[in-house]
Every structure is written in C-alpha cells, then in structure tokens.
Amino acid sequence: MLNETRIKVRFILNGESRNIECMAADTLFDTLRDSLGTMSVKQGCDFGGCGVCSVLLDGRPVYSCLMPTWKVEGSKIETLEGLKGKELMNLDAIQQAFATNFAQQCGYCTPAMILNAKALLERNPNPSVDQIKDALSGVLCRCTGYMPIVEAVMQAAMMRRKKTQV
Amino acid sequence: MSSTSQEQNLLFKEKTLVGVPLQKVDSILKVTGKALYTKDVRLPDMLHAKIKRCPYPHARILSIDTSKAEQIPGVRAIVTGKDFPVQQNEDTPAVAFSEALYANQAVVAVAADQRRTSELALEMIFVEYEPLPWVTDPEIAMTPGKTPTKIVHPSETWYEDPNVGRHIKIRKGDASASFKECDRVIEEKYTTGMVSHFQLEPVTFVAQPDPDGGVSVWATSSGPHKTQYELSRYLGMDADKIRAKVPFLGGWFGSKEECHVAAICAKLALKADRPVKLELSREETLTATGQRHPSVITVKDGINKGGKIVARQIRAIFNGGAYSSLGNNVVINAVLGAVSVYDIPNFHMDCYRVYTNEQPGTPMRGPIGFQIAWAIECQMERIANELGMDPVEFRLKNVLKEGSENAIGELMESISHDKVLEQVTSAMKLNGQGKSSIPQDSTQENKWVRGRGVALSAKWAPGGSPHQAMVRVKESGKVEVWVDVVENGQGIYTGITQIVASEFGIPSTDILLMPLVFGSDSSMSGLSGGASASRQLVNLGNAVLEASSNAKKLMAERASKKLGVPSHDLDVREGRVFSKTDFRRSLKISELFLRAPIVGYRTVASFTEGVEFVGYGTFYFRQGKLDPETGMTIGGRISPFYMSTAQIAEVSVNVETGQVRVEKIVAAADVGVAINPDLAKGQIVGSVCMAMGAATSEELVFKDGKIINANLADYEIPSIFDVPLVIPILVENPLQNGPFGAKSAGEPSMFPTAPAIRNAIHDALGIWVNDLPITSERVLEALQKLREN
Amino acid sequence: MRDLELNMVFDPSEVLRPSSFQDAVETLDSSDSKIVAGNTSLYSLARKGRLENIKKLVDISKLGISYIKEAESQTSEEKKILVGAGTTFQEITSSSLINGRPEYAGLKEALNKSPPQIRNVATIGGSICSAVSFYDLPIVLFALGTTLKFFSKKEGEHLITIDSFFQNPALYGKSLLIECQFSSSPNSASSFVKLCRRMSGYAVAMTAARIKLDRTSREIDDIRLVIGAMTKTPQRLNQVEEELRHKEPSIETITRMCEKSADLVHDIIPSVHASTAYKKRVLPILLREAITTAVERATER
Ligand SMILES: Cc1cc2nc3c(=O)[nH]c(=O)nc-3n(C[C@H](O)[C@H](O)[C@H](O)COP(=O)(O)OP(=O)(O)OC[C@H]3O[C@@H](n4cnc5c(N)ncnc54)[C@H](O)[C@@H]3O)c2cc1C
Ligand code: FES
Ligand code: FES
C-alpha cells in the first residue's frame, strides 16, 4: 500500500528554526499548511502558475506547490506571517500600502503579491512600473485588474525609501 | 431612506461616511494573511475527501464496486448516488445515480484520514459504465429528430422542443409584419463560448456533524441561507438542523453555487461521524462545476430611414448543460438584458435554455446578460455602420428615455443611458466609422493598427429574495450588526459598515460587524439572499437601515420619559438621544443603561430594563412574473431598477498575426450614489479586466464531449501584462429606494467591454467578428474574408 | 480490471543524494527512479498521474553542476561558455557572460518570459531534458548550436550536439546531463520570437534564430533557425537556412524565404484556439521577425 517513510528536514521558517518530518512527495505547500499552520500560503491551481502559494526561499519567491519539502533543507523560508513592521499596527510599509490603496478585493492573492513585492523591493528599492509588473507576473489576481496593486508597490517603495533616508 | 434621516443628513452632513473612500474594514486581516477562507478551516480529526468522476460525457452506471477501497486502512466513508434521496428531476444530483449526464460528473466519493489515502481509494473503486450517445451542441439538441440522445431528461418535457428546459417568449407589437415595411433589415448571428469565473480559491467545503444530529458546513458559497436550504433538500434533513457558514471568499463572481458538491461533503461527514474537508482541484472546478452558459444568439432588426429601429426579433439559445441548477431561472436575464437599453416598438424574443451533455451552466458575473449585451451591441455597431451613422448618435436615437416603458411593461426610472454615453465620449473620442484619426504606431510598418469602439448596456437587480438584518446598540454607543453578508472581495463589509455608521453618525470603528468576526453564518442572522445579482448592497443596505431605525425607536421610547419629550421628536446620533427641535434636550446613550456588578467579580456590566435596543429590518421586493404568452410583467416589476453603463475601448490589432492588444478602456457606470467611491471604481476596473479576458482569450474548449483545456496553461486569464489601462467614471444618479441612493457596481461593467473591443477591432481593420472569444485566428480569418470580398 | 497491487498514487519513498556522476547514473539504472532538478515540471507530471511507478527521487544538487563560466581555451574568433545543467534561469540571466551580449540576446529573451518563481528554481538541464517543444529556452539553445555533455553508465562523460538530442530524446532517459556549452563569434547574434495568446504563458508558436554575418561582405555566413510549439519536438529549418546562407540579408530575401517555410514543416500540432492552419500562417511572420532582429543585432556590433 502507501509507504510511510519519513524524511527529516530542518529549515528556518520566519526566523524560527524548524525540525519536521515529511514524505518524499510532500511539497513545501503541504508542509507549511498541514504541519506548520502558516495559512497565509494559499492554493489556486494544480500544476503551478497561479502563484498564490508563493513563499520566499532565501529571499527569492518560489511556488511552494512545486517545491519538494526535502529540498528546502537548511534554507530560510518566509511567509506573510513573518512580515512585521514597526509602524502602525505592526504593519510593514508594503502591507500598509496594500491596505490603503484598495490593492486587495477578495484578498486571496494578497499574501503572495506582498511577498513578491518584498523580494523585489529588497533588491531594487526604486523599481520602474515594468520591473514591478515583471516581479508580480507570477501571481494572478482575478479581482483587481492589477493596477491598484502596482500602485501600492510604488507607494510602498516610496515609503521605504523615505524611511531609510531619515 | 426615511425622510427624517434625510433631514438628519443635512444636519449632520459632516458625520456621514457616505461617499467616503474608507479603507476596507477587512483590509488589515487580508494584508496580514489572517483572513480565514473556507480552504483554511481545519478541525480536529478532519478527514479529506476525493471524488471519482465519470470519464464519459454520457453513460449508464452499471455497477460500482467499493469493496477493495473499503478495506484500505484509513478510509472512513464512501458515498454513492444511493446515499441520497432519489431526485428524479432536473436539478444537479450530488452524485450521479443511474446515469451520468456529463463528463466528470461525480460518481463516488471517499473520505479518509489523509488525502493520499482517499486518492488511493479512488483508484481501488471500480465502476462499470455503458457509454451512451451524447450531444453538446444546443442547436442540435433542440431540433426534433436531430438529437442522438433523444432527450437529456426523459422525465420532463416542459416545452414543445426536445431538451428545452426553459422557453421565454416576449411578444410586443408585430415584428414580422414591420420588417416588411422597413427600409433595411439586418440579421446576424452571434456566439459566445463557455467561460469560467476562475475565482482564485477553488470550490471547497468543510462539514462537521453537530451534537444534535445536524450538520455544520463551511462553504465557498454566495450565501449561507442558500446553502442551508439547498442542503436540506439534498440531504432530506430539516433545515433548522443545518448551519451554513461562509467565511471570506477567495473570489466568487457567481461560481461556487455548488450546493450539490456541499451535499457530498456533508453526507460523508454524517456517514463517517467526523469532520470532512472536500477541496476540488482547479481541474475539477473547471470541468465539474458550473460555468457561464455558451450561447447562440440571432438578432434581426428592421430600421427606418431616420435610423430608428422599428422591429427587433431575437432568438437566444443558451447551452444549459445537463441540469438546471440555477440555470433555468437565470435565463430571464436574457429578457432583462434585451429590453433595458433600447426603445423598440415591435419586439419579439425567444430565449431557450437547452439541456446538453455538458456540466450545468451557472450564473457568472452578469449572467446571461453578458451574452445578450455581446449580441446586441455588436448588432448596434453593425447597423450604425451600414447606415453610415455615428455609433453614439445611432444609439442615442434608439435609447429608452427616462419615464418610458420597456418591452415587458416596466417603467424605466433613474436610468442614465445618455449620460454614461456622454461621459465616455467626452473622455475618449471615437474615430467615427473606421476613419482612424488616432495616431498609429508607425515604427513597425503599421503592423499594429489602432481602433476605438463603443458599447452601451444596462444591468438589472432582480428582487425576489428577502434580506434581514439586526442591529444592537451597546452602552458604549457602539453598534453590533448581525447580517448574513458575504464578502467576496466586493467590499460589502465596508459598505454595510459605512451605511450603519452614517445612520448613527458614528465612526466606522464603532460598528461591530459580526460577520467580520465570525464569518457569515445562517444560524446567527436572519435570512438573506446572499451576494448575487447586484442586489446585496441595496437589499441588505435597506434592511440595516430599517433595523437601525427600529433600534433608534426603542431608545427614543425609553428616553422619552427621562427627557420629557415625545418619542417621535427624538433621534439618535453620535452617541446621544436628542430632541430634533431642541438639541439641548439630550442624553448620552449610556444614560439609558443600568449597571450591575457581576457577582463575585470586580467587573460591572451594563444592561437595559426590558428589551435590549435591538432593531430588526427586512427588505423584501416582491418580484412579478412574465406572462407566458406575451412576456408582459404581471404582479409587479421583475427588476426594481436598472443601471446604465457605457465603455469605449481602444485596441491595437496585429494585421499579420491577428493578435489583439487592448490598450485602454474608459468605463462609465451609474452607481446611484457611491457609498465608497474607491470600492465602486474597483468593481468597475475588475469587471472590465475580467470581461476583457472573456473577450480575447478565455474559453473552455470541448472535444469529444470533454473539456481539453482545464488548466492554467491552456485556459488563460489575464495576467499583469495583459490588462489595459482602465479609466473608471462614476455616474451618480441616486436611486430613490436605494440606501442613501446607492445602486450597485459589481456586475454592470462586465457588459460593454467585449462588444466595445470588437467594435474597436472593426474600427481598426474593417472586420466583423461575431464570435467570442476574439482569438487571433478568428481575426485573421475575418481579415482573409475581407480581402477576398 | 486493473492490477490491484499496483499503486496508482505518486508515492516515492526515498530521496537519493548522489555526490558523484557515477553514483547518480547508478541510481538511474532502475526503472523507478527519476532525477529532480528544479522540480517545476516534474511534479506537474506527478499530479497528472504520470509518475505512479516512481519510488526514488534523485536529487542532483550535490553534484556541483550549478555554474556558468567561460571555457579556458578561448580563441579570439570563438568564445565558449559552459553552463552547468543545474544552473537556474535566474543565475543565467544575471550572469555578466550573458548580459548585454547580442549573441545571447535570444537566450535572455526566452528566459525572461517565465515568471520569477520559475526563474528562481527551474534549471537549464530540466528545461532541455523535459524534451518538449513548448518550453522557450531549449528552442534558443537549439538555435545556438549548443553542445550537451551527458554522463551515462556505459559511456561515462560524452558530448553530443543538441540536434542529435532532439532527434531522439528518449535515448538519454537514463543519462545525466552535466553541462551545456555554447560558443559565439564576432558578428553573430541571436533572437527569440514568441507568439502567445496572452502576453505571457506558453507559446502558440515560437522561433529562435542565430546568425553570423560575414565581416566584410555582410552576407549571412551562418544561420540556424529553430521552431517550437509547432511540432512534437523542436525542429530546425535546414532548408530555409540553406537558402539564406551566403545571401545578403535584405528584407525582401528574408521575407521571400520565410514564406516558403510553412510548406516545409509537417505534422504541425494544433493548440487550444490555434489550428494547424493558423500556425502555418504565422510561422513565416515569426521567422521573418526572428531573422531580421538577429541580423539587426549582428549588424550593430
Ligand atoms: C508556472 C510555470 C510557468 C512556466 N513558464 C515557462 C515559460 O514561460 N517558458 C518556458 O520555457 N518554460 C516555462 N515553464 C517550464 C519550465 O521552464 C520548466 O518546468 C523547467 O525548465 C524545468 O526545469 P526544472 O529544473 O524544474 O526540471 P525538473 O522538473 O526538475 O525536471 C524536468 C525533467 O528533466 C529531468 N532532468 C532534470 N535535470 C536533469 C539532468 N541534469 N539530467 C537528466 N535529466 C534531468 C527530470 O528527471 C525531469 O524528467 C514554466 C513552468 C511552470 C510550472
Ligand atoms: S498553487 Fe498555483 S502556483 Fe502554487
Ligand atoms: S484580490 Fe482577489 S484575486 Fe486578487
């Protein structure tokens, strides 16, 4: 019948070290939601492409639904749960900008959009519209038509730049 | 809105939140990832369910052998058609009983400890089928003698032709006689394909057996009460024992009305006596749940010399798939769509919803009206072009005027057809008849040619479902709102919050919207029709206003003695009860409360003597009916009001490859009064982008009776690179019976986009495309035809 | 009836992490093992129920095959670049060896079409070894005349041309791809043109070209043209190449030659919303675009 072999994996999730056991077929998506309770990681498709399962792996966005859990051994994983700012209500600048710019309707794509924006802004504090579109192109949004999201990222970039100038 | 509160609005203008772009009340939950969706519901000991589906478009189920699967450790329940009360009617059964009528219809379901155990169990269940003849083309299905399967539903033939589940007739004047007298008669056929809502959260349910023998169900549904009552029917269980909860929805757009799938989940939970989660994959969501009805629509118009349409005849055929689901009811939308824009003295219409061996058609954002608007606005452009008239002028000439009567006898009030057209044309000029005056992209030897096109439509908001609300005023002056309101992204939580806050003149943070805390729950709130058909804001908005005013009445009565002012002279705002004639005679809300210690603790609680300050409200618009012979309304309107919307699209078309790039769309919509202008604009922009997808690339394609592109790689919704620049324009024409004058914004802007794009393509290249989606191939074919002529 | 003992669920039980090429190919010997690189295409196969018999996953990340470097012996005429099979798209696009060089412009265009989440993990090796005709990168690699270094149990390390790989990819099912080598010479340039239904997503049709111009005459010295998403595996258009070789790359000549191309390609597979006839019609257009772009780029050098 089904095999029961477990594989031990260690990684850092949102700054906390985790030791877990997984099956060879398990994806990071399964592990994050079923075992670790990071429910901000969503699912929208079967073979990759919708992007709502995005997480950051060593600072770069990946689709967690296509990432075998055993492959992240020793890596740093970030989900939206790990994003905290020191400002208002503990929100990061990107979160604030998304909230005030109506950059979410149903909100199902929002965790992934925010993480992708974060990965971009950490590398490129002053992105052009095209660079923002490229960075977010791996996540679909069925509700907003994307423009408010692009605007929110522009605004977040500005807020972050201001903060570093001070 | 009552006249007293209108006066209050004048007095307390500065305190109203109506028209304020308040940040969404759920935005913090959403940007922190804390918003709970059905997919996120986890219960102790929860099982995972999977469904085995029929591989044929039509088959008799000869046997189902579950014996091997039952022996797998961890398999806790298996259900087949036998587990449900037999439903020999046209409603989608939870699980196919003796025959499966479409490919991927559910045949057996399993719940097991782990997902992979359920998967394994499915592989160990053996079903024997006898494949039967099938039909997917509605025109063939409804032609006597032509169908390979005689009828999809042998038990019921309601209408004269085979497989017709619904036929609606409108007969106003004499269209065929008038055609003979017209200067010109133009007849064209338009088609649309099967389009998916593609809400990002796939269809999901969680069910839990309740201690009293009932069941609680978390559902990706548009309304908990709908799920509750439907489940009651499917399970044969008393509705009072069914509790349906709708947490945040990861997009909706009319999808997820899949109570038959909820029934599978609930049955498994009851059988296993454990909580069960049923998550449909994207492929299942695309192939086994309802999508937009494909259509074939013929429009025949007779026009006189002056450019007035004197007669119109429409034959609209909707491919309804194998069952009725909600489909037979939404066909009436074809009528509302066809009668709501133009004033045509002789109007004949026949709408058919036809059964075929496809998955049942279901409502999708602007259901049926989307298809009708496509046909009519394509036709309007065609006529204007043949007459050599300006497309806007031609439309204005034929448009229904305020106060006139439409073809089913409803009075057209509070419409803005001319205004929305005016707004879009002043924002972006049309070229006028293919005389492209816009700058063409000359760098690439004019391979990309630009054009602009216009379309005008109107959306209705059918009544019919009662909506109830309850508000409770607390000692702190905060107001609890108990309503079944479903937040699918449209911002209704925020809208309702703004309405109640404005009514009480308090900040939005003083509104305790209970669904924001618990999700929407059928056992906690009064009846509601849920979020569908553009009615939630108006209906629930009115219900909460009534509830608020009833709560205020109770407070006024209580305060009347204390203040020595008759209660009818009292109002409640900004945390005070005061005399409307003498503001100095007032008291704080807290003064109406008593306080008592909680024995044994140091806390003090507040309470009222007698009834609490709880107000109830019900909004129920009784819908009339259409006369089966003439199509005239009997016993009242069908739609209490209509919303006008117009758009101009600018496109670039590649003459070599046929690719269409939508560059820009100006979209004007009459929203009554925008309770929250940014939310309303968000709905417009979102609708336009979604409609653009349906216009240019989206379609579920059938081959041999099965969908061949049920995945993201082959069914492509617009990505961030594809969406045009959308400029939303709010037109405010207050609705007398709307809460603070509001109409709605969620659906109307779906209508004009596709025809505006198509008309823009004509402007660019002189070609007509009558079929959706406008694929590159179809554009090239049309170009070829043009060159050959 | 089906064999009841056969497990129909993707349920691998082991992850092997070989540290040498030899060990790696040993593990590939059995029919129930499969190499995992970026895994972006593997798990989709698994979810389509195509990997039910796979029990061992072979992780190749310990083999030291993620690199991008210049070959040591370089002539001034030809510069060779070596890319380890485990190198990700992202690593390739951000390499200074690739960036800003017209000979690899097509490569960059192809790599940038996929979303960042794919670029960050998908590997050049996985892209080639998937052996499908609708992935972008292999089309350009084919046009660049890439040499593939495989390691197999029988032959050890050996080089083959990408042309022979695509003639019969199944032959290499049990081999390990280690490295891709491609070279460039002055006056050469590449390009990539893709037609999709949306502005992103999989191609309905695509072409890649690599062109070398003669330094003095400015005639086409060498040309390679490859089409993807048209036929089952990527295809080279030898006949069109032949006709264009040693010709002056005027737009008229190019257009004329491209127009012939449609009749030279057989067994075109339709996609959703793009029939065989449509693909035939757009092929010459994409080809022309690819060639003229490559010529322009080569001329600018
Ligand atoms: C959402 C999405 C979008 C995409 N968009 C694009 C796009 O726009 N353009 C495009 O071109 N592609 C696109 N792709 C495809 C992507 O490029 C491929 O999935 C990727 O290149 C495969 O590489 P991988 O490292 O992930 O391979 P894996 O999935 O790990 O492996 C693929 C196959 O190759 C074998 N293999 C891997 N490495 C080796 C090796 N060294 N030796 C021998 N065999 C090996 C594996 O056994 C397996 O059979 C997309 C994929 C997804 C999921
Ligand atoms: S769930 Fe869609 S990309 Fe992972
Ligand atoms: S907000 Fe709903 S998918 Fe983006």
Image (cartoon, coloured by chain):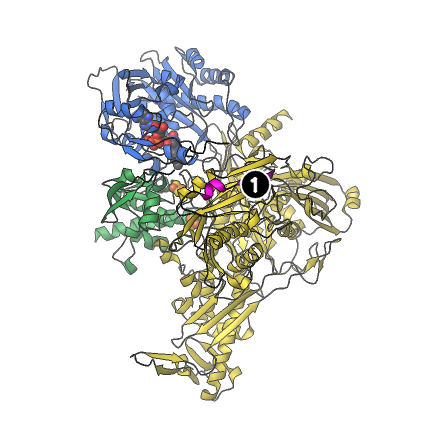
Chain colours: A green, B yellow, C blue
Look at 22% across and 20% down and name the residue there. Answer: C71
Measuring from the top left, give residue B40's x and y in whole percent.
39, 52
Residue lying furthest left: C72
On the image, which quarter does residue B506 sit in? bottom left
Q: Mark 1 points at which residue?
A: B194
Of the pair B197 and B133, the residue shown nearer to us? B133
| In-image side of B653 versus B115 (left or right) | right
In the image, ligand 2 is in what quadrant? top left
User: Where does residue B424 sit, x and y in percent of width and height?
Assistant: 54, 49
Choose between A41 and C223: the one closer to the eye: A41
Residue B81 placed where, x, y %?
56, 47
Residue C88: x %, y % from top left: 29, 31
Label 1: which secondary element: loop
> Dividing the picture into quarters, in which one does residue A131 lie?
top left
Callout 1 crowding tier (Cα within 10 Å): few <14, some 14–19, many ≥20:
many
Q: How many marks?
A: 1
Q: Considering only vertical position in the picture, is C150 above or below B372?
A: above
Query: In the rendered structure, which amino acid carries the disc numbered 1?
Result: Met
Front position in the image: A1 or B748: A1
Magenta segment includes B73:
yes
Magenta part of the chain: B58-74
Task: Tell me the subunit letter for badge 1.
Answer: B
- Is residue B430 visible in the rendered image? The answer is no
Q: Does the magenta stretch include residue B739?
A: no
Left or right of residue B598: residue B172 = right
The answer to whether residue C179 is seen in the rendering is yes
Foreground pick, B211 / C281: B211
Of the 4 image quadrants, the one containing the C terminus of chain C is top left
Q: Respond yes or no on whether mark 1 lies under 8 Å from ligand 3.
A: no
